[in-house]
Image: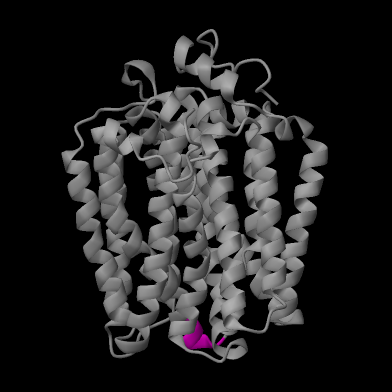
């Protein structure tokens, strides 16, 4: 009798060299990106001493992110995804260059932080759905859960190492070196893409449908599928109400009486739990009701965040953030797999673009929500109320979309493997029991 697997499944890295190349190349770049994730709000708070201003930095990123995601999603379904990733990585590198040059000036200005952050969000809107859509072409359908878990492990490693290192660098060297290091890491991802010898277009025959019509086609498909809508709404609920990261600078300095190192630890704590969760995902392939697993994971996230808002000590607070991070990575693995299995291959870039807009835009809306509530009622109230609203949102979604809680992907995955990427009959319609 086979022993149940607990640790993350490394088989996709062994079996699929192209996936291994992409994964290893983005490991270093993700670490560098997370340095900037901490440095920008820290620099803004140091300049303005306002959590609301930190939230506003995220607010200006929302529109570019949405536009970039829509454009990137259609491009990912029309063009060679590897080449598109090269372009997006080069564009992202220019934003890190702008932040580095501003931070290195004698009197750094506030406006470049807003401009570069907005541009970075727009370019990320192209990069992320393209990367996610490319993964589907690098592994077989049965390995998608394992590949998604490995990608989450990569991302969470960056979320741990990046903020922790950023806190040390910010306290000892200042913000300039952080941005320069981030810029240097892009050379690694570009080198991995140069080695990747795959041509992947979303449309059979390499068709190049672009523009509003292509975007509308993806939205039209989503409109008729309540299960896919639930995938996006459950994460949006968690990130808008239960992501208090805009308050980390204020909490680290004022509530926990620390400095840059404490702020870095708060940013890193969810990543510690998420990495632990990702490394212990050997069991996820045995889960039958993936929708229910998502709902339970988001409920754990909300409860942990609410408790984080009332604990006085840094150690316990970091522990709760780690629990939240572990729950979030479980949710992310299942949400990604549901999306990849249910969505027709030729629409995957556009639906991944919606996912990017939700995953990246939700926390930015959450920054504004938590920063705004904190300015009116205090940091602690903002954190606790957000966690409780997240729990309420899970209950409402489970009631409104009961099919999501009962969703089983086993049959859908088998149909996608044996009958082609478009669906049961080549029409792009998911198997029975999967559509909303």
Q: Residue at x 52, y 39 (%)?
A: 336
Q: Nearer the viewer, residue 136 or 369?
A: 136
Q: Position of residue 96 (x, y in %)?
A: 31, 66
User: Can residue 270 be seen by looking at this rendering?
Assistant: yes
Image: magenta residue range = 44-49
Q: Is residue 12 above or below residue 320?
A: above
Instruction: Compare residues 358 and 433 and report the one nearer the observer.
Output: 433
| Quarter of the rendering containing residue 307 | bottom right
Instruction: Give the overall secondary structure of the magenta segment.
Output: helix
Q: Residue at x 28, y 42 (%)?
A: 22
Residue 197 position within the rendered picture, expressed as x and y whole percent measured from the top left: 19, 32
Residue 45 falls within the magenta-colored stretch = yes
Say whether residue 210 is visible: no
Is 172 left, or right, of 347 in this rendering?
Answer: left
Q: Residue at x 65, y 41 (%)?
A: 293
> Residue 39: image x %, image y %?
40, 75
Q: Is residue 286 above or below residue 388?
A: above
Q: Eyeballing the image, is 223 above or below 392?
A: above
Residue situated in front as seen by the camera: 178 or 207? 178
In this view, which residue lies farthest toward the top? 425
Q: Locate residue 28, reporting x and y percent.
A: 28, 58
Q: Is residue 390 left or right of residue 68?
A: right
* The quarter of the displayed image where residue 120 is located: bottom left
Residue at (52% x, 42% y) in the render = 333
- Quadrant into which the C terminus falls: top right
Queried whether the magenta region covers residue 78, the answer comes back as no
């Amino acid at each position: 009798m086979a022993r149940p697997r607990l640790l993350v499944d490394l088989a996709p890295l062994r079996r699929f060299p192209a996936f291994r190349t992409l994964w290893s190349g983005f490991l270093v770049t993700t670490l560098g990106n997370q340095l900037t994730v901490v440095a920008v709000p820290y620099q803004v708070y140091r300049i303005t001493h306002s959590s609301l201003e930190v939230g506003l930095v995220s607010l200006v990123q929302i529109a570019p992110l949405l536009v970039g995601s829509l454009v990137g999603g259609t491009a990912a379904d029309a063009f060679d995804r590897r080449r598109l990733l090269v372009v997006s990585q080069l564009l992202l590198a220019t934003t890190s260059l702008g932040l580095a040059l501003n931070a290195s000036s004698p009197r750094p200005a506030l406006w470049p932080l807003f401009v570069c952050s907005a541009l970075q969000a727009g370019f990320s809107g192209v990069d992320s759905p393209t990367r996610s859509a490319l993964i589907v072409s690098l592994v077989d359908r049965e390995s998608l859960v394992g590949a998604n878990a490995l990608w989450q492990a990569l991302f969470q490693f960056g979320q741990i190492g990046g903020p922790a290192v950023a806190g040390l660098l910010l306290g000892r060297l200042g913000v300039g070196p952080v941005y320069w290091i981030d810029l240097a890491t892009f050379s690694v991802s570009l080198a991995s893409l140069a080695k990747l010898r795959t041509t992947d277009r979303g449309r059979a025959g390499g068709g190049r449908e672009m523009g509003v019509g292509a975007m509308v086609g993806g939205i039209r498909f989503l409109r008729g599928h309540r299960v896919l809508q639930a995938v996006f709404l459950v994460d949006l609920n968690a990130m808008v109400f239960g992501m208090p990261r805009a308050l980390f600078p204020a909490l680290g300095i004022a509530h926990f009486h620390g400095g840059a190192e404490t702020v870095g630890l708060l940013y890193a704590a969810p990543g510690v739990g998420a990495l632990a969760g990702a490394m212990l995902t050997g069991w996820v392939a045995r889960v039958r009701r993936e929708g229910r697993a998502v709902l339970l994971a988001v409920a754990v996230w909300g409860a942990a965040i609410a408790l984080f808002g009332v604990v006085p000590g840094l150690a316990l607070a970091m522990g709760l953030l780690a629990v939240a991070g572990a729950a979030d990575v479980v949710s992310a693995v299942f949400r990604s797999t549901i999306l990849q299995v249910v969505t027709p291959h030729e629409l995957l870039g556009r639906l991944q673009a919606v996912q990017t807009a939700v995953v990246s835009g939700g926390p930015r809306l959450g920054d504004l929500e938590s920063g705004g509530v904190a300015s009116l009622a205090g940091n602690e109230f903002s954190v606790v109320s957000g966690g409780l609203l997240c729990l309420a949102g899970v209950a409402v979604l489970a009631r409104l979309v009961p099919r999501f809680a009962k969703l089983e992907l086993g049959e859908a995955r088998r149909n996608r493997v044996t009958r082609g990427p478009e669906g049961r009959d080549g029409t792009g319609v998911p198997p029975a029991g999967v559509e909303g």
